[in-house]
Every structure is written in structure tokens, then in C-alpha cells.
Amino acid sequence: MPSPTLAGTGTLLRFAVRRDRVRLPVWILAGAALMATQASSNQRFYRTPESLAAYRASAGSNAASIAFSGPPVGLDTVAGTVAFEISSPLVLLTVLMAMFTTTRHTRADEEAGRTELLRSAQLGRHAPLLAATVLSTLACAVMGLAVALAARSTGLPAGGALVLGAATASVGWVFTGITAVCAQLTGVTRGVYGLVGGLLGLCFVVRAVGDIASSGLSWASPIGWAQATHPWSDDRWWPLLLPLAVTPLLLLGARRLLDSRDSGSGLLQPRPGAEEAPPSLGGPLGLAWRLQRGTLLAWGLGVTLLGFVYGGLAESVKTLLSDNPDAQVFFRGNSTADLVDSYLGVTLRITALMVAAYAVSATCRARSEEAAGRAEPVLAGAVSRSGWFGSHLLVALTGATGLLLVDGLATGASRAMATGDATDLVRLAGAAVSYAPAVWVLCGLAGTLVGAAPSAAVPTAWTLFGAVLVITLFAEGFDWPAWLTDLSPLSQTPTVPAEPWSAVPLLLLVLLAAGLLALGLTAFRRRDLVTN
Amino acid sequence: MNSVISVSGLVKNFGRTRALDGLDLDVRAGEVHGFLGPNGSGKSTTIRVLLGLLRKDAGTVQLLAGDPWRDAVALHRRLAYVPGDVTLWPTISGGEVIDLLSRLRGGIDPRRRAELLERFDLDPRKKARTYSKGNRQKVALVAALASDVELLVLDEPTSGLDPIMEATFQSCISEVRAQGRTVLLSSHILAEAEALCDRVSIIRHGRTVQSGTLGELRHLTRTSVTAETTRPATGLDTLPGVHGLRATDHRVSFDVDSDHLDSAVRHLTDAGLRSLSSAPPTLEELFLRQYGDELAAAGDAGLTESRR
């Protein structure tokens, strides 16, 4: 007989599976599809030893690709290049799946009051936590299996496929544990996502610095543990002992924390608020700013850190090159300054993608306010529809622009410190801000959706963002047709400083963004308010 | 008397569901108007149309002599609204919400704010996340009552309040009426409407079925009478308008249509009246009568109503 605090876990788990019967297969199929696409396209591209050697020379010594992918190991086989390129995206996907699944069945249910209703029945104190973490763990395992099968189906060796699958699942398990702990700390679902997202970013950066500097720092990150398995080259299983040891510890820790808090609240108690509103909280703009400033501040810190790290790593582009004789042949036509610029161009573009994600989420905040019924009391005041929606859009647009500027300044500052050339600061800040029109277009798309199709707006906006992300990151590597690449507003922006700056595409993007925003505002003015 | 709210033939559809089906509503300046109906009869939908949050499909709607959709911003400066289900921003304190909402309407009287916080026993420093349903409702009520506006639109404002707070609310509304302001009070708590309202409109399936003062509505219904007489009162059952007669030797009780009350009482006097008690119908009885056929139909068919 299991402990009474676990009573009802089985029932709850079956119910959770039923609630997620569409979501989880979608995540897992996305992982398998990503794996299969990468595996088959690499096998097409690097068929000859020459092409493989060229790839090894370029990617294996490119700090940007090491920063985003992982340690440049096993690049002498096609399968090795697949593992190098796909492990980070797979890990990201699996961690997000684990985070959303675990949070949805723990803190989100508790915050909405659903857990209380269930707990009043014959359900043990620990049952919801156990059911949620078991569900997430199983989902990660199935994701790993799907990844292995997808890789095997394209003809890659089975041994490495299993190692990559297990490594992918292992990061998901660790983050299931991390999410379970964070869900006890804060009483707000949004806060859990913030904490876990921040930790994920930290794990990613620690690993990137470790891989580029070839120091042992990567062992401080669960992503580093997974990538230390070296699928298809060394096929090492032993690094996975680390996640297997750490995950149960995290889960036990989460249980301890659950026992030391009240149902419905987090360990971090909210402080009492102000008795009276500050003068700034007097209109729709003040309210939108108040609601979004915390998130924006956290993003600002993250982007600043990222800018400093990526800018600081630019110097190692040269070191990597001098270590690699193949690469020196490959890059003979280019000066090292060009290589550094191309590295910086890629890092700024990746950060711009993240800022675009912020912009989409900040725009969708208007919709979640409306759906929760919190737009109603404001619009029942002397506030126009455009005033309310426009305030959220304004926060999203200026917030995203500010983040780009901060990223550019941080990258530029750390670069200027290395080169002693102060113009680097201005040059890189300008390069980062050049992405603003592209990011505004994504704001505009999300805004149009919120205005015109409120019920479907949030999932559709994120699907569009996902498409832009995939196109921007993979279109070139997968050799997709040019018209598809052109669909991403970020691909329309020149990768300054690697490419020359050009005003025409940026002006077109600004016009497009303005048109979309106007469309969204007009549609919102004309429709009924829709609450859930 | 001029109308503050004047609605006629209002129609609102949600997809294929018809939520409002030719609704009429007339609220006069300075009155407390009860807006009554069971769950899902269209009270909140009507209020949202009045606030310009939803767009009407047909009919005419006038609010404070303006068009609630077109003139929303200007009109909202002159009214305060308490939603039926108050959702607040979890990280913002109750005091801040009160200030925000009243600033959106054009200012707050700080003395009145402090007094209302005291009367409703509300801690303004707590974050909205930690408030119970009743406390969230108090936040919205304090914000509305402290605002200097002509019209209060209250959608089931007391559904989460305890009896003590309910009494506080009733005294606040009486003060509002004394100041000459107008109140539209949607409710299904009939005792509350009975205590507060000058006139009521009863709606059902998105349509107004009755409207008038309580006196007028009562006139259309029955009074219950219980009497003791020296001689057995016979022949009551032959009188028109008498229903549900129960008689023992010297004691009778029955319901009588209001326009036949006079003849029934005369008949009792003839039998030597010893004691008489008569009660006008409560709003509850009016309401049940209005919906009685529906309840009966629902019982017959084993169905319950589910309309928005």
C-alpha cells in the first residue's frame, strides 16, 4: 500500500494524460520531425569527404556555431554533424515541453483553484506533484524514443540514435525537477515560467562559454552533460548518470518544499502592496507599463548578460581559428576581422529572435488581460478601445526596441573593451537596433490577430513566431527555397556588421509593421469584448 | 421624468445563440432600478451592451442621452460599474486598484474612499491575488461608490458578501439614492431588490416580461390571507379569485387575486372576524409565479434551462 499522501496519483495521472492528449503528441512529433529533417539534409549535403572537411573547418572553428550548438566533436562523420547541429534545438524543445507540462499540472492548476477542488476529494497531498512529474518524465522519455527512431529511420546508426535520444530526454528530466521546485517557490504560474526560463538561459550560457573556452565549465550545465555523451562518435552513456542522480534529488526537494508551504501559496510570500496608487498608475498606459515592467526588466537583465557573453567570446573566434589548420585553409580569403563580424552578425540575429519572442508575448498580454476579464473594468472607465490596446502595443514595441538597444550596447561594450575601439560600441548598437523593424512586424502580426481573431490569437501568434524561428535558423542550412527564407522579417534585415547596412528593406518593414498595427487597432475597435 | 437608460427591442446574438431577444428597459433619473432574472437570462449581456463592451445587433439603446457604443469614453466618465465576477490584477494592491479605477472615471473623493474602506472593512494593502471573492467585490464596490458619478451600474454586486456587508451595501445604496444618483442593480437576490428598488424589470430568455414599481407588480398578483372567524366561513370557494383554500372549523387561509381582496374580506366579516393577517406577495413569490410555468415545464421534460 503506497503512502496515503500519494492516494489518487494513478487517477490523476490518467486524467492528466487525457488533458494533454493533443499537446504532448504535437511536441513529440515536432521533435521527431526536426530530427528527421536535420538527419536527411545533412546526409545529402555532406556526402563527399571534401564537403565534410569543409564543414568541419568552418563550423568546428566558428565560435558562433559552437555557442549555439555544442562542443565540436565527431565532425569527421555525417552523423557527428547531425548530433552537433540538432542537439541544442532538441534540448530546447524538450525542456520547454517539460516546463509547460509540469507547470500546467502543478502551479497553474493550483493558482486556478482546481487543485483545491480535487484535494477535497480522496487525493493525497503529494499526488498532484507526483502525477505531473511522472507525466512530464514519461513525455520526455517518449520524446527521446521518437528522436532515436526518427534518426534511425533516416539511416543513421542505431547506437548513436539511442544515445542522442536518451541525452535529449535526460535534460527534460532535470528540468522537470527544476520546474517542480520552482512551482513550490512562487505562487504565480507566470513566475514559474520566469524562474525556469532564466535557469534554462543560464544553463545555456554556461555551456556555451565552457564549450568555446574548452574549459570544464560545460559540466556545470545539464545541457553540457547531455552533449558530453558525444552521440555517433564516442557514444558515451556514463555522463547520463549525472541527470539520473540529480533529477530524483530535485523531485525530493520539491516534495520537501511542498510540505513546508500552504496549499495555494508559494514559499515566497507576496509583500503587502501600497495603500494608494502612485500618480503613474492613472491610465491605460500606466497600467500596461505596471503589468509588464517586471517581465521587461527580467528580459533586460538576460539580454544584457547574453550581449556581454557573446561580445566577450568574439575574441575566441581568432583563437579557435589558429588552433585549426583546416579552417585556416578554408577561410584563407577572409580576414579574421570579417570572421569576427560574421560571428557577431549571427549572435545579434539570434538575440533579435529572442527579443521577437518577448514582443509576441508582450502583445499577447493584451489578449490574456481581455480573456481573464480584466479589460472590462478598464474599458468601463473613460478609456477608448484604441487607448487600452494601443497602450499594450506601445509597451511591447518600445520594450522590444529597448531590449535590442541594450543587447547591442552590451555586445558593443564588451567588444570595445577587447579591441579598444570605441566605435565598436556604436557600430554594434546600431546593428542590433536594425532588427527593430523586423521585431515590430511580429508585434504587428500578433496585434492583428488579437484585434481580428481574439479566440485563436495567442496560439496562432506563437505558431507564426515558431515558423519565423525555424525559417531564420534553419532555412539556409536545409537549403530551403529563397522565397521561404524571404517570409521571415528577420531574414529581410541585413546581418550587420557582416553585411552592409541598407535602409530600403528596413523602411519596407516599418511600413508593413505600421499597416499591421493599424489593422489590429481598427479590428479591436469594432468587435465585441471576448472573455473566457 | 427623463430616462437615464432607455432600451427598446434590443437584440444580441452570440453565433447562433440569441442572448437578448427584443429586450426593453427604462431607468429613470434618480431611481434605484432592479434588473431581475435567473442565471443566464441576459442581465450581464444587457449591461455589457450598455457599457459599449458588446455591440448590439438590433434595437435602440440610449444611455445618459448618448450612444453607448459610439460615445463610450465620454459616457463612462459619468458612470461607475461593478462587474458580477470581479477579476483583478494579481500583483496590484486593492488600494491601487481602487485609485486606478476611479482615476479612469475622473477622480476620487479621498475622504469618502477612507470612509468606505472602513465601512467595508477592507485592507487596501493586500495584493489582489490574496483577496477572496467577497473582498474583490468590495474593492470594485469601494471604487464605484467613491467615484463622483451620476449612474452606478451594478451587476450582482453582493453575490460574495456576507450578511453584515450586505447591510452595509444597502445603506450605501440608500445614501446614493438620497444624493439623487441613479442605480441599475442587477440581482437575483430578491430580498435585496425588495429592500432597495423603486422599480424593477424582470427578464427571461432575453426579453422583458414585467416592469414597474413593486406596488404595480403586486397588483397583478395574489395576497395571502389567514383569518379566524366566530362562525365557520363557508362559501369562500365560490368567490371569484380565491385560490388554495384551506379551512378548518374556525380558521381559513387562502390566496386571493388583488382585485378580489375586498369581496373576500367582506365575506369573512360576515362570518364574524376574530383575527386577520394578510401579507402582500414577496418579490420572491412574484418571481416564482413569473417562472412557475417554466419550472413546471422543466420538471415535466426533465430539462433545465441553459441559455446565456
Image: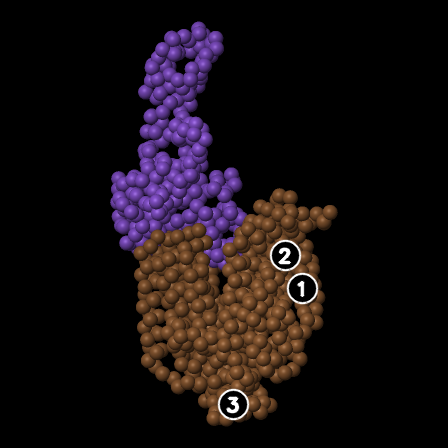
Chain colours: A brown, B purple
Q: Tell me the distance, in whole angstroms, between the alpha carbons under discs 2 and 3.
A: 49 Å
Picture coordinates of residue B59, whole percent (x, y): 26, 44
Q: Would you call the spot at circle 1 few (<14 residues within 10 Å), some (14-19), or many (20 or more)?
A: many
Circle 3 residues within 10 Å: few <14, some 14–19, many ≥20? some
Instruction: Say which amino acid is labelled 2.
Output: Val
* Kind of residue at badge 3: Phe
Q: Position of A320 compared to A216: left or right?
A: left
Q: Chain of mark 2?
A: A
* Vertical placement of residue A401 versus B205, above or below: below
- Residue bearing the label numbered 1: A247
Q: What element does badge 1 sit on?
A: helix
| Helix, strand or loop at mark 2 | helix
At x 51%, y 47%, the residue is B133
In x, y percent, where is residue A165? 61, 67
Q: Nearer the viewer, residue B59 or A434?
A: A434
Q: Which residue is mark 2?
A: A134
